[in-house]
């Protein structure tokens, strides 16, 4: 685990299980919702998608993606959301066994759903959490450790 990732960011990630994944091709954005497993030690998200879907094809063309995780609420003081930029990576053989294993441990029924396992390797997080003050933002950047 990257010791520079604020605990409040990790808490939001660990309190949820669905992220919105955004891809783009030809200057046209697209998004989908995915169940995820977060591996804190490696700072990666594992998701399962089908390469034959629009987002799957777009990831094959452009592995730079964005994602968001948020608490759905209409109470201003409870708004929480995490914006993420990442690289999407498909794995094979040994690495695939690991990511598939942690995903199936949480979602064993995923065996019945056709798809491919991939990881999202974050390079940026921006957390908005109004519980700490309206508009309070925390950021983390893999390169600069903002």
Image (spheres, grey):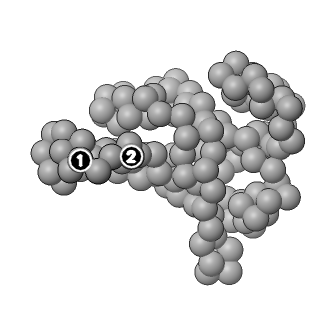
Q: Which residue is drawn at 70% across and 47% down?
A: 89
Q: Report whether 85 appears left or right of 92.
A: left
Give how far across and how far down residue 16 sits, in percent. Answer: 47, 33
Give how far across and how far down residue 131 sits, in percent. Answer: 19, 39
Task: Return the residue found at the far bottom.
Answer: 27
Q: Report whether 82 appears left or right of 59.
A: left
Viewer-proximal residue among 68 and 119: 68
Viewer-proximal residue among 142 and 12: 12
Say what secondary structure mark 2 lies in.
loop
Q: Residue at x 80, y 59 (%)?
A: 53
Q: Residue at x 65, y 22 (%)?
A: 106
Q: How far apart are marks 2 and 1 (CA)?
A: 9 Å
User: Does residue 86 lie above or below 113 as drawn?
Assistant: below
Q: Which residue is drawn at 69% across and 65% down?
A: 62
Q: In which quadrant of the rendered view does residue 29 lie?
A: bottom right
Q: Report whether 79 appears left or right of 27.
A: left
Give how far across and how far down residue 104 sits, in percent. Answer: 74, 24
Residue at mark 2: 72
Residue 75: which disc?
Answer: 1
Residue 92 visible, this orientation: yes
Residue 2 visible, this orientation: no
Q: In which quadrant of the rendered view does residue 133 lie?
A: top left
Residue 131: which disc?
Answer: none
User: Does residue 121 lie above or below 97 as drawn?
Assistant: below
């Amino acid at each position: 685990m990257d010791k520079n990732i604020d605990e409040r960011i990790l808490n939001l990630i660990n309190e949820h299980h669905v992220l919105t994944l955004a891809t783009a091709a030809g200057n046209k954005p697209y998004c989908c919702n995915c169940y995820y497993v977060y591996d804190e030690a490696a700072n990666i998200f594992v998701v399962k998608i089908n390469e034959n879907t629009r987002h799957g094809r777009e990831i094959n063309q452009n592995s730079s993606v964005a994602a968001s995780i948020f608490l759905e609420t209409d109470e201003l003081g409870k708004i929480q959301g995490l914006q993420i930029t990442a690289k999407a990576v498909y794995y094979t053989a040994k690495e695939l066994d690991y990511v598939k294993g942690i995903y199936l441990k949480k979602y064993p029924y995923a065996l019945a759903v056709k798809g491919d396992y991939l990881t999202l390797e974050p390079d940026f997080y921006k957390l908005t959490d109004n519980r700490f003050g309206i508009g309070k933002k925390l950021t983390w950047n893999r390169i600069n450790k903002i």
